């Protein structure tokens, strides 16, 4: 695909990253960071176990990589596409990176930080409030997670 054309299915790319993470033994969460023009700046899946780093969530990895690529700590106008509702750490990081929009797949009632838990982006004192849309290909993203954890319990 030419670099100047936005991807047709960024959530599909994030799901591919989630599958790759599962194949590495990581919790299957994948993320893609799109530039203001829709081009892919970064894509990755969880690497918590491999990096032995509790902060190596897919979202953190792509935001850091995109910031390096752009040469700026601000991702203004960028879109974070992730297969699972960001946790409070990742939601707060998106605020500090000044991400413009977050699209996520499965909701996370136990560990989410956008629509669940502290609901960071809806707080009146939130320093930057990205737009967000949840439930994008929710069933597919949720099935990946459920399948991964069922296999672990066997």
Image (cartoon, helix red, strand yellow):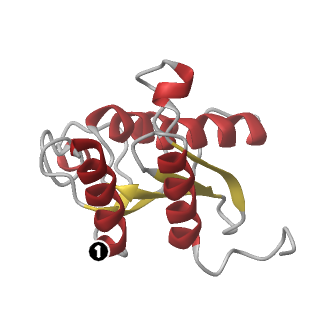
Q: Residue 148 at what x, y percent from top left?
A: 33, 52
In this rendering, is residue 9 above or below 95? below
Place residue 136 in its image quadrant: bottom left
Q: Residue at x 78, y 77 (%)?
A: 5
Q: Residue 149 at what x, y percent from top left?
A: 27, 48
In this rendering, is residue 112 above or below 138? above
Q: Nearer the viewer, residue 136 or 133?
A: 136
Q: Residue at x 76, y 35 (%)?
A: 71
Q: Residue at x 37, y 76 (%)?
A: 137
Furthest toward the bottom, the residue is 8
Q: Residue 151 at what x, y percent from top left?
A: 30, 50
Task: For the N terminus, give its image quadrant.
Answer: bottom right
Q: Nearer the viewer, residue 17 or 98?
A: 17
Q: Is residue 74 visible?
A: no
Pointer 1 residue: 139
In this rendering, is residue 25 above or below 16? above
Q: Residue at x 48, y 43 (%)?
A: 59
Disc 1 is placed on an element classified as: helix
């Amino acid at each position: 695909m030419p670099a100047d054309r936005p991807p047709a299915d960024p959530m599909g790319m994030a799901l591919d990253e989630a599958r790759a993470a599962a194949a590495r033994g990581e919790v299957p969460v994948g993320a893609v960071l799109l530039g203001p023009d829709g081009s892919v700046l970064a894509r990755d899946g969880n690497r918590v176990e491999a990096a032995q780093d509790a902060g190596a969530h897919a979202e953190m990895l792509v935001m850091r990589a995109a910031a390096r690529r752009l040469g700026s700590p601000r991702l203004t106008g960028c879109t974070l596409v992730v297969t699972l509702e960001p946790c409070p750490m990742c939601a707060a990081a998106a605020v500090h990176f000044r991400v413009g929009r977050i699209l996520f797949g499965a909701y996370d009632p136990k560990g989410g930080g956008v629509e669940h838990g502290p609901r960071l982006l809806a707080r009146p004192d939130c320093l930057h409030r990205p737009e967000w849309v949840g439930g994008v290909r929710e069933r597919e993203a949720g099935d990946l997670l459920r399948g991964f954890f069922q296999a672990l319990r066997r």
